[in-house]
């Protein structure tokens, strides 16, 4: 069996499986979003009785004076700001931890793991934010999200810095690089696949965070997209058609960005071949 | 070896400690301080408005919860099943999606799609797909004459069904990390192996598997911690039910929090922290000891 | 607990928007705040389409009448996060100047005496019915203005099915079961009694809605319960659990009870595929949305007790508008104005009728239900007019175990007996009472 046939057969099988496993739920979400409220409320996998996607879309977009648009902007600012900070800071930590093992490493590892394990304490965090005058401000929220994401990023960077040969560091130092240039111009670029991975994963986490902005960034002007979902589900009256339209709206833009970033990881594949 | 060691110690100055400082400052102010404060509240009866010191009563109360043992067993099962599945599937998909095959871009996108869908949406979607009488899954099973279980309503199945949904939702992250890990392996290793005429299996076993260890380490730790702490998906699908059959420690704590037992739920979090640490630290130590240094 | 709490909330945040033409104390806003000499306050309501639309309409009307005040609408999510957000905002001094929240037990959990502004001196307060004042008051003050309608807990039933089979509304539990058996015998395709444990909170309704029957037999039961003396494990409260067990074993329940959701059950009821559904009348908006043609086919009766003399409808009170202590000066005056405007005026009742679906009876004496309300609402009103009503337990006592939904699912599914379930719930409540620091537990 030559490589081309293999690529078609394996790819074909994978695509067929993906239809069943991933596209069926996706189609369900899509169908819910084009139905009327009574139809969607039955949660059945059936063809819509009536197609009202356009109505649903305009209703969701016009809810609360176009809250959706503002929410997208807020989510974007929050995500970009916090992910930038956490990636840079965590890469620096992961790099030093891996390159310069010391007795303190165990302690640091413990705190990194603790950051992953312990859920944030809401009320004491608000006190800290009030004391630092950052409560209800986007910059405070950015710092909070960056902090909550640090542990994950440090873990990943620390693991992956190991794949970059130390000889490169030494060569760069011989070329006269200082610590800052060594890290930012030599090591960080080589970490590109990991950096992209971290950016993708943490962007999703921040973008999907509901509780954080709810407590630390209250006020309808500051709403993020996850908060808009709660308008359409309640104990007394739910509009699942609008809920699923909202879900589609909040899912598709990140998916498109993901496809774009994914290319960057593939680009990393070729650069991987050059290095070393 | 000794020259290498010497050069390494010379290099130390190029990995300055102050690189840690900004992260440490953020961590201490926005995480460590609030967390320590909240640990104090685990020793109090706390209404958010005021608190009363009651020593270890909350811990005693927490351990007396009749559902705790069940919740503990469920937590371990859930964490083990989801972690194992995410590692195996994540690595397989990572290999598949870094190899050359048709539709690769589509496949990468579609595997990642569930990661982006909010938990509320996933809960409703699977409640519908897995509905024992009207759901499409049992419809398909019935059509080919297979039994049609109550995926989310049978006390013996509910936990595993939610675990499966969890894997469905989370495998995209594991896959992504594996893709990064496999991509980070220098191409020369594979070329050299192919020149030596090594089989695909052998290449996997001797090169890909050991050299993607950073990815494995990360996926193991993350999915283990995630699995031990998890409750939001359980909450959105079964609410811990039917009865208490799919309750985990996380959902027991959440219920207490929901009921306004803030001191008690904080005590629960302290216990959960200790449990998770007890599981994760040894695993972490083992995985790191064998870390490969290129 | 989720269910119980949301139950409260649901009735609370409904619907009412009132505009007080009456009794607005002239309070000139002076110095400090706002853009261009205007006072700005914010108004927090639950993030639900219906209540937001209603709240926005109130704000528009209020701003028109009070050009020197700006009101911003702010929202919080329904459920546990919402409850905690409200407490968090209060305890950190960040609460909006006016907020809408449940009455009864959840209101008491806010520590009103320390956190809220006493409104007993307001002009509208004197006209409030005592039944409502009680659920927004402590010994030291009255803190809430009613917003919305009370609703009835009992059984929603399909009148077409009843007419077709010539059934009459049951007044005893055995008549209720007998009706079910007649339906089953005559129309095998119609489910006699719907149960929908796909939404676990619905399983509590048969227990919660039986409470008026308990009060009828022992008027002081709720106080005894709070004091740790009365238990669900003993008669008369035990009956609710044993009835639920009987219902589960009766063969009268739909076979997909474990997975059916509340919305599906309401649809089945409206379509005549189910005949009866133990529920609270605050679910009528869902029927109005999903089955608009069937609204008048739905009727309501009280959950029957063993003895017809005890059969009484259980009433849920709507939530209130509250002002936190953190509102001061001009903002406090503006907030009081807004509360009066919204809670007790004819204009507001009109806006409310236009933007909401009737679920029961208005609390504010200024507000009147229009004459063309649905049949179920008329049925609830009949119980109120006859005085055959008593409040739900959560308006009389703050003791409320968090696991009632799970316990009732197990009883209704036949996993545990009614007696065991009642015992489990007593233990569950003990734990909560201890967390509240109540004595006697």
Image (cartoon, helix red, strand yellow):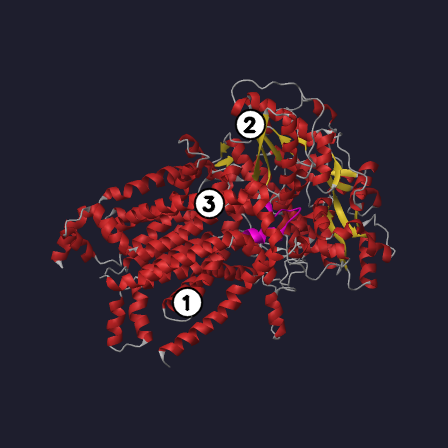
Instruction: Give the secondary structure at mark 1.
Output: helix
Of B241 and C345, nearer the camera is C345
Q: CA distance from mark 1 to mark 3?
A: 30 Å
Above-or-below relation of A60 to A14: above
> Where does the image place residue B27, in percent across and percent down from the top left?
35, 41
Q: Which residues are magenta?
A: A231-246
Q: Quadrant of the C terminus of chain B?
A: bottom left
Read off the residue under disc 1: B104
Q: Is residue B270 left or right of residue A109?
A: right
Above-or-below relation of C89 to C380: above
Crowding around mark 2 (Cα neighbors within 10 Å: few <14, some 14 to 19, many 20+) is some
Which chain does tag 1 point to? B
Of C344 and B22, nearer the camera is C344
Crowding around mark 1 (Cα neighbors within 10 Å: few <14, some 14 to 19, many 20+) is some
Of C249 and C154, nearer the camera is C154
> Where does the image place residue C331, in percent across and percent down from the top left?
56, 24
Residue A5: image quadrant is bottom left
Read off the residue under disc 2: C40
Above-or-below relation of A147 to B117: above
Which chain does tag 3 point to? A
Crowding around mark 3 (Cα neighbors within 10 Å: few <14, some 14 to 19, many 20+) is many
Q: Is residue C235 visible?
A: no
Read off the residue under disc 3: A75
Q: Are marks 3 and 2 in contact (CB under 8 Å)?
A: no
Residue A269: image quadrant is bottom left
Identify the residue at image location x=63%, y=38%.
Answer: C399
Indicate yes or no whether the magenta region holds residue A135.
no
Q: Are marks 1 and 2 in contact (CB under 8 Å)?
A: no
Which chain does tag 2 point to? C
């Amino acid at each position: 069996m030559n490589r081309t046939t293999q690529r078609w057969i394996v790819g074909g099988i994978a695509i067929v499986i993906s239809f069943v496993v991933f596209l069926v739920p996706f189609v369900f979400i899509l169908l819910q979003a084009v139905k009327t409220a009574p139809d969607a409320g039955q949660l059945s996998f059936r063809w819509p009785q009536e197609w009202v996607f356009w109505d649903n879309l305009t209703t969701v977009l016009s809810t609360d004076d176009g809250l959706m648009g503002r929410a997208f902007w807020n989510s974007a600012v929050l995500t970009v700001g916090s992910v930038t900070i956490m990636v840079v800071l965590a890469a620096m930590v992961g790099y030093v931890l891996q390159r310069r093992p010391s007795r303190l490493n165990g302690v640091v590892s413990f705190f990194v793991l603790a950051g992953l394990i312990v859920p944030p304490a809401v009320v004491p965090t608000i006190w800290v934010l009030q004391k630092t005058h950052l409560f209800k401000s986007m910059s405070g929220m950015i710092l909070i999200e960056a902090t909550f994401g640090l542990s994950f990023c440090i873990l990943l960077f620390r693991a992956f810095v190991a794949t970059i040969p130390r000889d490169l560091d030494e060569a760069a130092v011989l070329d006269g690089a200082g610590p800052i240039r060594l890290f930012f111009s030599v090591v960080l670029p080589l970490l590109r696949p990991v950096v992209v991975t971290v950016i993708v994963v943490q962007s999703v986490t921040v973008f999907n965070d509901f509780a954080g902005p709810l407590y630390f960034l209250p006020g309808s002007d500051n709403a993020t997209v996850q908060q808009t979902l709660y308008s359409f589900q309640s104990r007394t009256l739910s509009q699942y058609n609008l809920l699923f339209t909202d879900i589609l709206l909040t899912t598709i833009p990140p998916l498109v960005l993901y496809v774009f970033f994914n290319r960057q990881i593939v680009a990393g594949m070729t650069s991987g071949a050059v290095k070393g | 070896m000794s020259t290498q060691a010497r050069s390494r110690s010379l290099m130390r100055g190029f990995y300055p400690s102050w690189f840690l400082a900004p992260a440490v400052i953020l961590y201490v102010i926005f995480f460590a301080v609030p967390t320590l404060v909240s640990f104090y509240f685990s020793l109090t009866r706390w209404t958010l408005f005021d608190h009363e010191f009651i020593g270890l009563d909350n811990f005693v109360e927490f351990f007396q919860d009749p559902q705790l043992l069940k919740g503990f067993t469920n937590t371990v099962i859930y964490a083990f099943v989801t972690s194992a599945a995410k590692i195996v599937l994540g690595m397989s998909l990572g290999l598949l999606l870094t190899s050359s095959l048709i539709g690769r871009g589509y496949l990468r996108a579609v595997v990642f799609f569930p990661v982006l869908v909010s938990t509320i949406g996933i809960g409703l979607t699977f409640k519908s797909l897995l509905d024992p009488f009207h759901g499409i899954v049992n419809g398909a099973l019935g059509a080919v004459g297979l039994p049609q279980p109550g995926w989310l309503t049978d006390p013996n199945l509910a936990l595993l069904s939610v675990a499966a949904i969890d894997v469905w939702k989370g495998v995209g992250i594991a896959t992504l990390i594996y893709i990064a890990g496999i991509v980070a392996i220098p191409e020369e290793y594979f070329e050299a192996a192919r020149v030596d005429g090594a089989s695909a299996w052998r290449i996997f076993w001797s090169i890909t598997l050991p050299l993607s260890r950073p990815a494995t380490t990360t996926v193991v730790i993350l999915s283990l911690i995630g699995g031990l702490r998890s409750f939001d998906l359980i909450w959105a699908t079964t609410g811990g039910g039917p009865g208490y059959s799919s309750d985990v420690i996380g959902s027991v704590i959440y219920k207490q929090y929901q009921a306004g037992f803030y001191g008690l739920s904080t005590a629960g979090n302290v216990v959960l922290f200790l449990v998770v640490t007890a599981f994760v630290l040894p695993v972490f130590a083992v995985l790191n000891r064998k870390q490969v240094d290129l | 607990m989720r269910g119980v709490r949301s139950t409260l909330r649901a009735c609370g945040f409904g619907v009412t928007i009132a505009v007080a033409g009456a009794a607005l104390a002239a309070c000139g806003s002076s110095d400090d705040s706002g853009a261009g000499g205007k006072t700005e306050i914010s108004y927090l309501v639950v993030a639900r389409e219906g209540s937001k639309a209603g709240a926005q309409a109130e704000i528009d009307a209020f701003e028109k009448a009070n050009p020197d005040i700006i009101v911003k609408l702010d929202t919080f999510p329904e459920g546990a996060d919402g409850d905690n957000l409200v407490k968090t905002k209060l305890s950190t001094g960040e609460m909006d100047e006016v907020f809408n929240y449940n009455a009864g037990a959840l209101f008491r959990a806010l520590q009103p005496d320390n956190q809220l502004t006493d409104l007993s001196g307001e002009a509208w307060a004197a006209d409030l019915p005592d039944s409502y004042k009680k659920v927004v008051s402590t010994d030291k003050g009255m803190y809430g203005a009613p917003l919305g309608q009370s609703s009835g807990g009992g059984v929603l039933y399909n009148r077409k099915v009843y007419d077709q089979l010539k059934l009459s509304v049951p007044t005893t539990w055995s008549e209720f079961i007998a009706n079910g058996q007649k339906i089953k015998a005559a129309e095998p395709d119609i489910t006699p009694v719907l149960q929908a444990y796909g939404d676990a909170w619905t399983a509590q309704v048969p227990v919660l809605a039986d409470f008026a029957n308990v009060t009828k037999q022992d008027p002081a039961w709720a106080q005894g319960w709070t004091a740790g003396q009365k238990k669900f494990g003993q008669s008369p409260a035990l009956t609710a659990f044993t009835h639920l067990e009987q219902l589960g074993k009766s063969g009268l329940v739909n076979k997909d009870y474990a997975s059916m959701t509340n919305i599906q059950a309401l649809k089945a009821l409206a379509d005549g595929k189910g005949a009866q559904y133990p529920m609270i009348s605050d679910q009528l908006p869902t029927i109005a949305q999903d089955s608009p043609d069937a609204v008048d086919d739905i009727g309501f009766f009280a959950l029957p007790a063993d003895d017809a003399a005890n059969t009484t409808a259980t009433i849920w009170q709507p939530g209130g508008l509250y002002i936190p202590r953190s509102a001061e000066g001009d903002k406090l005056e503006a907030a009081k104005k807004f509360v009066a405007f919204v809670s007790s005026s004819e204009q507001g009742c009109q806006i409310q009728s236009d933007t909401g679906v009737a679920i029961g009876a208005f609390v504010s004496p200024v507000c009147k239900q229009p004459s063309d309300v649905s049949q179920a609402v008329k049925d609830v009103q009949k119980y109120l007019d006859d005085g055959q009503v008593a409040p739900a337990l959560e308006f009389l006592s703050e003791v409320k175990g968090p696991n009632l939904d799970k316990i009732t699912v197990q009883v209704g599914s036949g996993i545990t007996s009614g007696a065991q379930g009642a015992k489990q719930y007593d233990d569950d409540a003990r734990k909560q009472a201890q967390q509240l620091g109540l004595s006697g537990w």
